[in-house]
Image: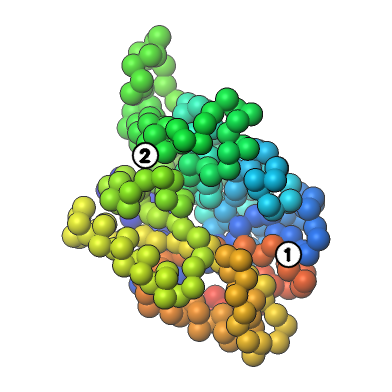
Amino acid sequence: MENSRQHPAFEAVFKPGNLSFGLVLPLTRAGETRPDPHAQLYFARLADRLGFSALWVRDVPLNSPDYPDPVEHLDPWVHLGALAAATDRITLITGAIVSPLRHFIHTAKGAASVDYMSKGRFLLGLGSGDRPGEFRPFGRELSDAAERFRENWERISALLNKDGRIDPSGTAADPNAEIRPRPLHGNIPMLAVGSAGQTIGWIARNACAWATYYRPLARQRDRYAIWRAAVQKVDPTKSPAFASSLRLQLEDNTHAPTRQLGLGLRLGRNGLIEELLTLREMGAEHIMFNLTSNERPAEAVIQELASEVIPQFR
């Protein structure tokens, strides 16, 4: 997808030398397992108004012991439809659709529909899934996930980014059957979320960006260096778009020390800004804040990020 950098929704999130910020939905407080969907729409509208660049929605078909987070998740396509109607500017991203568990036509149709409803504000993030207990009820095996991910990526990309009539499986009964509506800007940029069982070279050749989990700075720096080398091997002129999640517990005390959490940090605002400045210097272009299990109200954290953190990176 050579023209992804010219796609308005992609450009709003990924700009070389810039660091943008998003929120992972749902936002929850400590002990909350059933988020109020109306409150989540309020947070989405608030983030849209306050200058966040993206809202990320996860795909969790089943809650089980394999998925230790007990929080209930809406179906991602239903959720995205509501977000598209509730917001005006902010980019909507799946982080990620579990591609091996969904038919590629359904995924392409959902992506095209959200793109249309949001007036072109959608990016499609795909992952392979990693929980055996989630695969078995679908009659799938986790051992096949990486191969199915590659196959579905090719088919979804063809349906969304070409003429909508290409069926790589060769099984279409009607050669004129096509995915409608067509993407508003001619294509929908596709992101790889996690490694998805693929080599870094495969991701560099096929994805317009790579989104990965939080790691301590030294490890993340090494991760980004591998990604940059892989992208530039494919195309020396191409800028490596890189996003990272960050589970965040932002304390009231601005000077609170930094403590490691699973997949994130607990710290004060000053420490957070230092962390983010280092990530930007490293080459990261987008950070998605995961505000789960916070002791503070989500609105207070969003307001502080918008008024005291985001302006440091404009």
69 is higher (above) or lower (below) than 269 = above
Closest to the observer, 99 or 46 = 99
Amino acid carrying label 1: it is Ser
Residue at left 60%, top 30%? 136
Image quadrant holding the N terminus, namely top left
Question: Which residue is identified by label 2?
Answer: 186
Please tell me in which quadrant of the rendered image residue 11 appears. Answer: bottom left
User: In this rendering, is residue 84 above or below 140?
Assistant: below
240 relative to 82, above or below? below
Query: Where is residue 143 shown, x and y percent of the image?
Result: 47, 35
Residue 251: where, in percent of width, then height? Answer: 70, 80
> Number of numbered discs present?
2
Colour scheme of the picture: rainbow
7 or 238, which is in the foreground? 238
* Residue 144 in sight in this render: yes
Question: Residue drawn 34% across and 16% down?
Answer: 170
Asked which secondary structure carries label 2, the reply is: loop
Identify the mark nearer the N-term, 2 or 1: 2
Mark 2 → mark 1, Cα distance in angstroms: 39 Å
**Which of labels 2 and 1 is toward the front?**
1
- Identify the residue shown where x is 48% and y is 63%: 244
Please rate how many residues cluster around mark 2, counting C-alpha atoms within 10 Å: few if below 14, some from 14 to 19, many from 20.
some
Q: With respect to residue 186, does 55 lie above or below? A: below
Going by the numbered disc 2, the residue's amino acid type is Gly
- Element under disc 1: loop
Q: Which residue is mark 1?
A: 293
| Badge 1: residue crowd in 10 Å (few <14, some 14–19, many ≥20) | some
Q: Residue at (36%, 69%) from the top-left corner?
A: 222
Label at residue 188:
none
Query: Does 112 sit left or right of 66 as displayed?
Result: left
Residue 187 pos. (x, y %): 38, 40
Residue 304: x %, y % from top left: 66, 77
